[in-house]
Image (cartoon, rainbow, N blue to C red):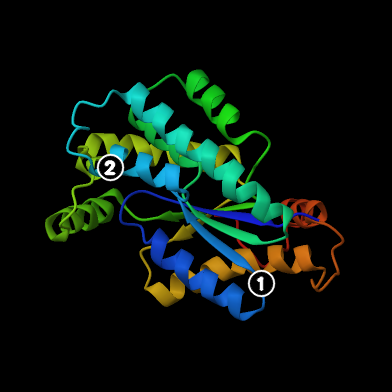
């Protein structure tokens, strides 16, 4: 059996990185081998691309198409160099952003052709798909406040955070569309709560997945397929679908 791929998504300032770290620690303490990754980045090549995309002084005039291709160049390397081998070794991979970010940011935010974006994403990731995606949601006003505070306090420029509010509103619409289209994989978490409450809500989604994966679920689910089907079909499930 392969490992698990759990991705974290959301607009700027939603607390993804903090929650990924908390979950990684919890899973590690349980005895699992956990790999924590970020996009763009996660490999030596990817980190060079990340610098070009976000921090380089030469990226001010970067075309949306260039951004799309660079994001997916980093992703293609990450999938082949790290994610695929880790899953083959039955590790749990936690990734701060994955291809849903490209749909939200480049297709919706940058208004690039959805067909073109999807084709490039599919080429970059091959057959790798997340087992669970945690979408951390905060109101656009909260996201904007946190983003501006981070820009003001950071010594390192981040081009992606310099976009206007209308761009991030389109990104939010993108995430809403993704969640509506794939509600079994994408689970929404209210990230306006305190850190502990958010991590508790995240664990409500992660725990049954991990138990199904290890064969330790209450009903001794035999496969991830049975787990996914049960959460979709069982109207009495303790986990809400909002």
- Residue 122 percent location from the top left of the image: 59, 29
Q: Residue at x 17, y 58 (%)?
A: 154
Question: Taking 144 as reference, is 28 above or below it?
Answer: below
x, y percent for residue 103: 46, 33
Residue 111 in view, yes or no:
no
Dividing the picture into quadrants, the one containing residue 211 is bottom right
Q: Element type at marker 1?
A: loop
The answer for how far apart the CA atoms under marks 1 and 2 are is: 32 Å
User: Which residue, as the protein is rendered here, is positioned at the far left?
Assistant: 152
Query: Residue at horizontal 84%, vertical 64%?
Result: 221
**Where the N terminus falls, by quadrant?**
bottom right
Instruction: State which tag comes first along the sequence, 1 or 2.
Output: 1
Q: Quadrant of the C terminus?
A: bottom right
Residue 144 horizontal side relative to residue 29, left or right: left
Q: Nearer the viewer, residue 67 or 225?
A: 67
| In this rendering, position of residue 32 left or right of residue 107 | right
Quick one: label 1, few (<14), some, or many (20+) residues within 10 Å? some
Identify the residue shown where x is 53% and y is 39%. 77
Left or right of 149 in this view: 9? right
* Residue 22 percent location from the top left of the image: 47, 72
Write the residue at 47% across / 48% down. 43
User: Which residue is tagged 2?
Assistant: 54
Decide which of 178, 44 is in the foreground and name it: 44
Give above or below for 67 relative to 168: above
Residue 214 place in picture, x, y as percent? 78, 68
Mark 2 neighbour class, 10 Å CA radius: few under 14, some 14 to 19, many 20 or more? some
Residue at the disc numbered 1: 32
Which numbered marker is on residue 229?
none
Q: Is residue 27 visible?
A: yes
Q: Tell me: residue 233, above or below residue 209.
A: above
Q: How many marks?
A: 2
């Amino acid at each position: 059996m392969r490992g698990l791929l759990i991705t974290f998504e959301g607009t700027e300032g939603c607390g993804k990185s903090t929650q990924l770290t908390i979950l990684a620690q919890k899973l590690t303490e349980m005895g699992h081998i956990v790999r924590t990754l970020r996009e763009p980045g996660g490999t030596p090549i990817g980190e060079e691309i990340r610098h070009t995309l976000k921090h380089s002084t030469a990226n001010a005039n970067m075309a949306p198409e260039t951004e799309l291709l660079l994001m997916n160049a980093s992703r293609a390397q990450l999938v082949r160099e790290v994610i695929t081998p880790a899953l083959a070794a039955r590790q749990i991979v936690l990734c701060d952003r994955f291809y849903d970010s490209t749909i939200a940011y480049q297709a919706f935010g940058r208004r690039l052709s959805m067909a073109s974006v999807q084709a490039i994403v599919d080429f970059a990731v091959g057959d790798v798909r997340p087992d669970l995606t945690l979408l951390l949601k905060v109101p656009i006003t909260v996201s904007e406040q946190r983003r501006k505070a981070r820009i003001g306090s950071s010594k390192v420029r981040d081009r992606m955070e310099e976009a206007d509010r209308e761009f991030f509103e389109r990104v939010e619409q993108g995430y809403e569309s993704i969640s509506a289209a794939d509600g079994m994989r994408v689970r929404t978490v209210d990230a306006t709560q305190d850190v502990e409450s958010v991590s508790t809500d995240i664990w409500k989604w992660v725990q049954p997945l991990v138990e199904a994966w290890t064969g330790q679920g209450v009903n001794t689910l035999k496969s991830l397929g049975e787990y996914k089907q049960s959460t979709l079909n069982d109207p009495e499930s303790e986990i809400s679908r909002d």
